[in-house]
Amino acid sequence: MPLSEYEQRVLEQMERALTSDDPRLANTLQSSGRRSVLRYVLAGVAVVVGLLLLVVGVASSSTWIGVVGFILMFAGVVFAVAAPRRKSGPAGVVDAQGNVVPPKPGKGDGDRSSGEGGWSGFLTRLEERWDRRRDQGR
């Protein structure tokens, strides 16, 4: 039984609200579980080439060729099994009419005190927590 237009609009508004309120949960719920065939083909090629290098390295007593082959095999398996990275963060904010408006500049994740991301942002937050703990001990 198909949904009416009103029910479809309400469902879309609820989805947009969920996406803007909790993007991690929305990404988890939206994951289809299907991955690209190209991803599996590349991983398979890496595993086969790595296996060939491993066999050649053992047959020729070249340790470094065998090690490179093993690393390539391992990387191929990890590439096939690991989930692809996604952009995280809010897609926008839902206004009173139910439309998604892009977030204002400078408003990202609420738990980050600086606008930096990645490894440097992690280290900055770690240093800030360390300083707060040290100051509390005084």
Image (cartoon, helix red, strand yellow):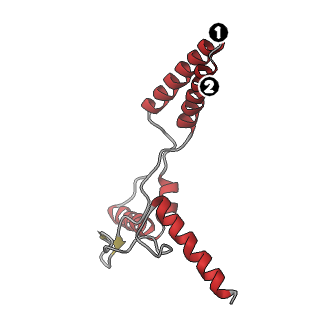
Residue 18 falls in image quadrant: bottom left
Residue holding disc 1: 59
Residue holding disc 2: 67
Dot 1: element: helix
Give the residue type that dot 1 points to.
Ala
Residue at 60% over, 23% down: 64
Name the mark on residue 124.
Answer: none
Residue at 58% over, 20% down: 65
Q: Residue furthest top?
A: 59
Give the residue type that dot 2 points to.
Val
Task: Say whether residue 122 is left or right of residue 6.
Answer: right
Nearest the camera: 62 or 129? 62
**The C terminus - image quarter:** bottom right
Residue 121: give x, y in percent of width and height: 48, 65
Disc on the earlier residue, 2 or 1: 1
Position of 109 relative to 52 (above/below): below
Nearest the camera: 52 or 36? 52
Residue 90: give x, y in percent of width and height: 40, 66
Residue 125: give x, y in percent of width and height: 53, 71
**CA separation in Å, label 2 and label 1:** 13 Å
